[in-house]
Amino acid sequence: MRNRKSRFLTQFLTRKDKMAYSMSVAEAKAFLRKVREDQIRCSKKIVDIWEEVLVKNSFSLGEEVWLVYEQVCLAALDCAQLDIAEGCYQALKAQFPNSLRVRKLEGMILEAEEEYDRAMAIYEDILEKDETNAIATKRIIAILKAQNKIQDAVEKLNKYLKEHSLDTEAWLELCDMYLHELDYNKAAFCIEECILSNPHNHLYHQKLGEIKYSQCEYQEARSYFAHAAKLNPNNMRALFGLHLSATNLVSSQKGTQKTENARHAAWAAKQIKDRYKTQLGKNRSGDVKIVEDMLEALKMSSS
């Protein structure tokens, strides 16, 4: 029975149609629990399940209904379905009138309605009652960013990271803010902090390679792209980055270094073409030719 349910959950996560119609209440309940436990983001499917299966059967959820209300509220906000979010919030507010966790949802609904001043007031009130509330601090930063107050957001986020230095999501957000301001050195520092926290995440190495490439530091960029491709051989951005970095180095070097980088560029180009051939198949050889021409054009533009 457990295996059948696991297969059903996996199947539902990978399907694009409204499979919610065929779910029982027990399966819907199990699916939402699985999503919460594994922290899977599939907001549209959560809302579909709520509307098609659970909204008329919420009484059968028992005490778990409050977790589901919160889950559906957040998913509805993600899908811009504010009426559903508001309904779930009102149910939670009636049950937990003094909960800071529920007040956070009120602030997020106001954010979605672009009532930034009112949302900010709620988050500041939450922080007065619980100064360690990280979510309220992050919501304030999100509001500052939405209002295009990037410098204020950067200042607030730097202050937050002094107390939460292991928060990789915050480091990534700060990295993107610095990139928005074209401050590549500080952006590189942020992503280096992420690499220290999780050195096996290929996306971090890829991002640092992109930053170094933007700074025209092609040797370092090549190293980071190569490591990202080693960690995940199917990372196409890393392969393209490796190809471009090595090609740029070929045009500016001589002797053995030039030969070595030419070899790296050729290897990356072969990996890219092989993956396109695998994905497109024999019937779309014309599309593969387009990729080959593109790689040749990139090589010529870098030389």
Image: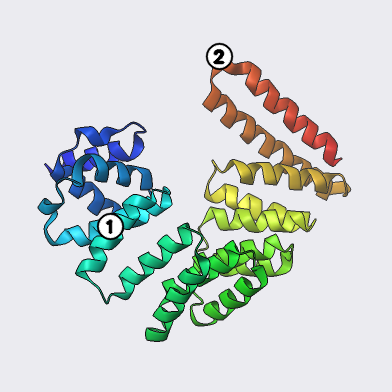
Q: Between 5 and 244, which is closer to the camera in this rendering?
A: 5
Q: What residue type is labelled 2?
A: Asn
Give the residue at x 32% y 51%. Answer: 84
- Residue picked out by circle 1: 88
- Residue closer to the observer: 169 or 273: 169
The local secondary structure at tag 2 comes to helix
11 with respect to 233 (left or right) = left
Horizontal side of residue 227 vs 67, given as left or right: right
- Residue under pointer 2: 283
Residue 191 shows up from this direction: no
Which residue reaches farthest top? 283
Identify the residue shown where x is 77% and y is 30%: 296
**On the picture, is 189 further left or further right than 56?**
right
Amino acid type, mark 1: Cys
Residue 151: quadrant of the picture: bottom right
**Residue 130 visible in the snapshot:** yes
**First of labels 1, 2 by sequence position:** 1
Quick check: 157 above or below 62? below
